[in-house]
Amino acid sequence: MKKTIVSLLAIAICILCFTQIAMAKEFSDVPTSHWAHEYISKLSEAGVINGYDGGIYKPSGNVTRAEFIKLIVSQTILTLPGMDEYSYLLKTGKNWYDGYVELAKEYNPYIYDDESLNQPITRAEAANILDKFAKNQGYYFIPYTEPEPITPEEIDQQYEFFRQILLEMNLTSNKNISEKDIVNKIDNMKEEQAVIFWERYDELSPAKEDDSIKYDVIEEGLFSDTDNVSYGEMVAISNIAKLKIINGYEDGSFKPDNNLTRAESATVIYRFANVK
């Protein structure tokens, strides 16, 4: 009986300890009503991010480039199988972040300027780094799917378009030209004629909807204030936005030159680690 009571007390103490630890992960300046509470809380519980003395997180504070690199490396490279043998790298160098930067350089084709690592990272820079890591992780791989077979009705419509265009281009005067003769006419077109022919066909033929996401293709009008960023940054911003890792603001802007806040960094790192 006494052993049973002692065991129950031990379990109760363990539960109490775990409860206290979980409570310690909450920050006084990140209430449950805060838009980033879920992301900050989960990364804190996982030990990925830390707060400050006094139980605060400073969600509006800036994140340095070095701090952001540590976060993304921790959620990508360090989660790969066999990375335990490289853990010694995290303890090398004169700065706390040197090991993380070395791992980032090894796995990620991005220029890390040592002199600026302690500077705040902008939203555009964060998108650029995330984009490189997303490519490294294979996030943009789109598996091949067999195209839907063309129907007999679609084939008939296609030849009707061919006849119409050949008549418009004066390449035939026969309104009832056979399909065999149509193919022969197309095969024997001159290059400049073929260009005009297929451009006209694209105008007539209704394009089928393609619901696949195209990466490295800038979506026009995605954000209202990214016209002045570099082409590479615009591609990265577009890619990461399509993955729904970084969003814009309610006014349609992205604010590429704004510093990434601690709340935003927790959000994008959590989303990055949970991309489906």
Image (cartoon, rainbow, N blue to C red):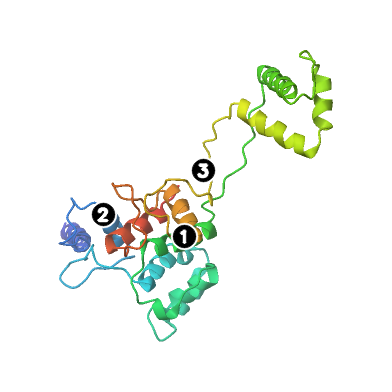
Position of residue 220 in the picture relative to residue 52 (left or right): right
Q: Position of residue 222 (x, y in %)?
A: 41, 47
Q: Position of residue 100 (x, y in %)?
A: 44, 74
Residue assigned mark 2 = 36
Q: Going 66% across and 26% down the picture, which residue do you hit?
A: 149
The three-letter amino acid code for the residue at tag 1 is Glu
- Give the mark toward the camera: 1 or 2: 1
Position of residue 128 in the picture relative to residue 201 (left or right): left
The quadrant of the image that shows the N terminus is bottom left
Residue assigned mark 3 = 213
Q: Which mark is residue 57?
A: none
Compared to residue 47, the image places residue 187 above or below, namely above
Verify CB contact (< 8 Å) between mark 1 and mark 2. no
Compared to residue 254, the image places residue 179 above or below, namely above
Residue assigned mark 1 = 233
Depth check: give the residue in front, 111 or 273: 111
Q: Earlier in the sequence, mark 3 or mark 2?
A: 2
Position of residue 95 in the picture relative to residue 172 (left or right): left
Q: Earlier in the sequence, mark 1 or mark 2?
A: 2
Position of residue 134 in the picture relative to residue 173 (left or right): left
The three-letter amino acid code for the residue at tag 2 is Ala
